[in-house]
Amino acid sequence: MLPVCQLLIVFHHPPCEQAEEALMPLIEHGLQVELVDVAKHPELAERVPVLRRTDTGDELEWPFDTDALVHFLK
């Protein structure tokens, strides 16, 4: 079973949009991802996009590819 994740983003930020696109194949296979806009939190906004597991709190920073995502989600 895939964990639930949060994608920390700033809306209309090209790298964040690319990260969303990279996650789409996994979302289509059951990955649940909550988009969290961190624009009002400068300490987080400068790091986006970041994928965070809600079960462990582990984070995967951009850029990530499919192999990195699969490893992160195991």
Image: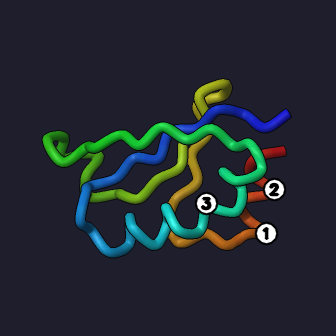
Q: How is the image coloured?
A: rainbow
**Count of numbered marks:** 3
Helix, strand or loop at mark 1: helix
The residue located at (39%, 68%) in the rendering is 17
Q: Position of residue 42 (x, y in %)?
A: 17, 47
Residue 62: horizontal and vertical position, in percent? 50, 66
Secondary structure category for the residue under label 2 = helix
Quarter holding the C terminus is top right
Q: Which residue is the extreme one toward the top? A: 55
Q: Mark 3 highlights which residue?
A: 23
Whole-number angstrom distance, CA of label 3 to CA of label 1:
12 Å
Compared with 36, 64 (above or below) is: below
Q: Which residue is mark 1?
A: 67
The type of residue carrying mark 2 is His
The amino acid type of the residue labelled 1 equals Asp
Q: Quadrant of residue 35?
A: top left
Q: Which mark is residue 71?
A: 2
Whether 39 is drawn above or below 23: the answer is above
CA gap between label 1 and label 2 equals 6 Å
Amino acid at the residue labelled 3: Leu
CA distance for labels 2 and 3: 13 Å
Residue 74 lies left or right of residue 27; in this view the side is right
Relative horizontal placement of residue 74, taking residue 41 as reference (left or right): right
Q: Are marks 1 and 2 in contact (CB under 8 Å)?
A: yes
Residue 49 at x, y = what percent? 41, 59
Residue 3 sits in quarter:
top right
> How many other residues sit within 10 Å of disc 1, few (<14), some (14-19) or many (≥20)?
few
- Residue 10 appears left or right of 26: left
